[in-house]
Amino acid sequence: MSEVTLESLTKRYGDELAVDGIDLTIRDGEILGIVGPSGCGKTTTLRTIAGFETPTRGRVRFDGVDVTHVPPEERHVGLVFQSYALFDTMTVRENVAFGLKMRDVPQRERRERAGALLEMLDIATLADRRPTTLSGGQQQRVGLARALAIEPHVLLLDEPMTGLDAALKTRLQTEIRDLLADLGVTAIYVTHDQEEAMAMCDRIAVLNAGTVEQVGTPSAIYRRPANAFVANFIGNSTLLTGVAADGRVDLGFAELEVAAATNGTVTVAVRPEAFEFEREGPISAEVSSATYLGDRTQLTATLPDETTVALHADAAETYRTGETVSLSIDDTSVHVLE
């Protein structure tokens, strides 16, 4: 497998700057997620790593070797697309073995390697069927098997779960994550779905307008977002303005015992679960909406300073629009943005 390094990676399409000086290292054997809103440069970055795009400036290195101008077929990269891109005129086994055939691997070895991957992905019984007869989840597994058949140094996955139902997506996330970990494949996983990235990936790179806002583990990015963009894109945050001094932050309607890097005006990111419901809490909020989600009730409420917040409430409780609830904030669950 390979370590992938992007050095000042920049890509322009005429006057449009799609990728703006990205410096990023994907460690050997890790699954790195690339997330961000539409148009942030996720797919362009992936296509540049694959060799389908040549950067306007910067370098792509595999294990320190410059592959910026190496054609895609010589990079030993496996690809799994959103559309799966399977050949309808071939059987499942022939689809999986296609890359090996293009590399002049002997027929017997192609068949054995394809069979082993189909067994590994629990779709061996589908070997002689055509892709058009398969479900979305089955096609997704075939696409993954085909990408893995060439034993790639780097596996690139571009929105591979799009279109799958929620239950199947959850099951495949676990299966694919465990499979890639067992194989030790270096994988780059592009998705717009933040929850999918957090479930699948060892680390996440958050992109915005062609630049990297933050790179870190799912836990670090969720608990310690680098800025307001990350706090709002990964999960749901309320951004509160306060004044920091002597290890405390005064929000005006409540005080938090939390240290800030400097005294003065600061922004505090508060996740919904950091708000705690109490009989006589120091904060009063008026409920403006309540949505039952099974494991919890999602509330929208207004704080004394007119800030709208999202709250996670006990699903067993009933809340009405206009009702006032008493809250406190768990100091240990908030993060002061630098």
Image (cartoon, rainbow, N blue to C red):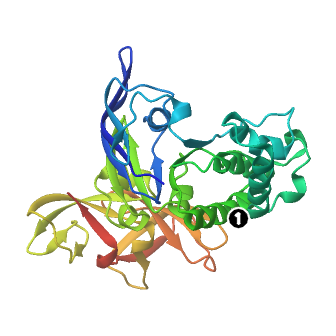
Question: In the visual, does 211 lie left or right of 84?
Answer: left
Residue at the spot 30% in from the left edge and 78% down from the top edge: 332
Residue 84 appearing in the image: no
Camera-side residue of 130 and 198 = 130
Residue at the spot 86% in from the left edge and 47% down from the top edge: 134
Considering the numbered disc 1 on the image, is that residue within a helix, a strand or a loop? helix
Q: Which residue lies furthest to the bottom in this view?
A: 279
Camera-side residue of 61 and 83 = 61
Res 277 → quadrant:
bottom left
Spot occupied by residue 227 in the image (x, y as percentages of width and height) = 28, 52
Residue at the spot 38% in from the left edge and 14% down from the top edge: 14
The residue identified by callout 1 is 171
Q: In this view, does 307 lie above or below 12?
A: below
Question: In the visual, does 250 lie left or right of 88?
Answer: left
Camera-side residue of 1 and 249 = 1
Res 294 → quadrant:
bottom right
Residue at the spot 55% in from the left edge and 65% down from the top edge: 181
Spot occupied by residue 233 in the image (x, y as percentages of width and height) = 43, 50
Spot occupied by residue 109 in the image (x, y as percentages of width and height) = 75, 50
Res 207 → quadrant:
top left
The number of callouts visible is 1
Spot occupied by residue 260 in the image (x, y as percentages of width and height) = 15, 67
Q: What residue type is labelled 1?
A: Arg
